Image: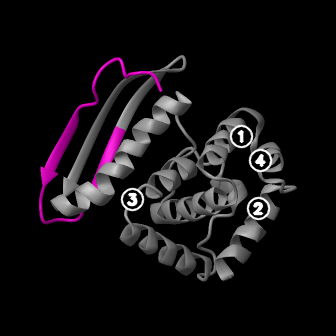
């Protein structure tokens, strides 16, 4: 990636409360015009989980140069967190999939532009599907898949990059992967 035109301001609040963060961007015509990051919580959680997550948002912003689909953005960012957080999301995904009516079908998840009311479903499923796709083809293939899908559609992308016939076939294989 090219050097950023200006630094990303990072606001840090060390506290004993829960860990979290937020990063915002302004995009215009394929450029990142501005960015700002906030992280908070216990220092150990900021360093191993929150900061890697938020930095990945910035990498995605500069890589794609446009807003990234929510599931891929959040799911891909959780991949950069520590094992404790990834295990928590894996457990959450399994709980979601075993709770009738809670799961978001991938066809709908992939096209969401806003966070749903049950935001943890988006984070958990996004992480799990991202992890599965990375396990199939690696991180560069995952990034190329997301970029291709943003231009040519999800069904075309799953065919081109993972050789699935449809998003539904991907969903079946992902769920079977979790069961095994």
Please give the residue where the numbered disc 3 appears in the rendered image.
81
**Camera-nearest residue between 106 and 44:** 44
Q: Is residue 104 left or right of residue 148?
A: left
Of the numbered discs 3 and 2, the one sitting upstream in the chain is: 3
Which secondary structure dominates the residues rendered in magenta?
Answer: loop
Q: Nearer the viewer, residue 3 or 126?
A: 3
What's the CA distance linking mark 3 and mark 2?
25 Å
Q: Closer to the observer: label 4 or label 1?
A: 4
First to last magenta residue range: 1-23
Residue labelled with disc 1: 149
Reading the chain from its start, which is encountered first: label 4 or label 3? 3
Closest to the camera, between mark 3 and mark 2, is 3
Q: Tell me: residue 170, above or below residue 101.
A: above
Do the residues bearing badges 4 and 3 touch, measured as CB atoms within 8 Å?
no
Q: Which residue is mark 2?
A: 170
Q: Answer with left or right where residue 52 lies relative to residue 101.
A: left
Disc 2 crowd rating (10 Å Cα; few below 14, some 14-19, many 20+) is many
Q: CA distance from mark 4 to mark 1?
A: 10 Å
Precedes in sequence: disc 1 or disc 3: 3
* Circle 4 SS class: helix
- Sequence-wise, the earlier of marks 2 and 1 is 1
Q: Is residue 8 magenta?
A: yes
- Tell whether 159 sits left or right of 7: right
How far is mark 2 from mark 1, CA to CA?
14 Å
Q: Nearer the viewer, mark 1 or mark 3?
A: 3
Q: Which residue is mark 4?
A: 161
Mark 4 / mark 1, whichever is N-terminal: 1
């Amino acid at each position: 990636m090219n050097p950023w035109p200006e630094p990303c301001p990072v606001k840090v609040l060390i506290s004993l409360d829960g860990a979290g963060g937020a990063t915002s961007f302004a995009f215009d015509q394929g450029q990142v015009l501005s960015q700002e990051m906030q992280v908070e919580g216990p220092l150990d959680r900021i360093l191993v989980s929150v900061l890697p997550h938020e930095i990945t948002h910035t990498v995605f912003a500069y890589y794609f140069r446009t807003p990234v689909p929510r599931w891929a953005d959040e799911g891909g960012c959780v991949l950069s967190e520590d094992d404790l957080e990834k295990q928590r999301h894996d457990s959450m995904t399994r709980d979601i999939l075993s709770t009738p009516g809670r799961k978001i079908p991938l066809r709908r998840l992939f096209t969401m532009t806003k966070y749903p009311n049950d935001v943890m479903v988006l984070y958990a499923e996004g992480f799990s599907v991202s992890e599965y796709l990375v396990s199939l083809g690696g991180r560069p293939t995952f990034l190329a898949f997301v970029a291709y899908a943003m231009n040519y559609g999800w069904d075309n992308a799953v065919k081109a990059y993972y050789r699935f016939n449809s998003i539904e076939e991907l969903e079946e294989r992902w769920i079977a992967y979790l069961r095994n």
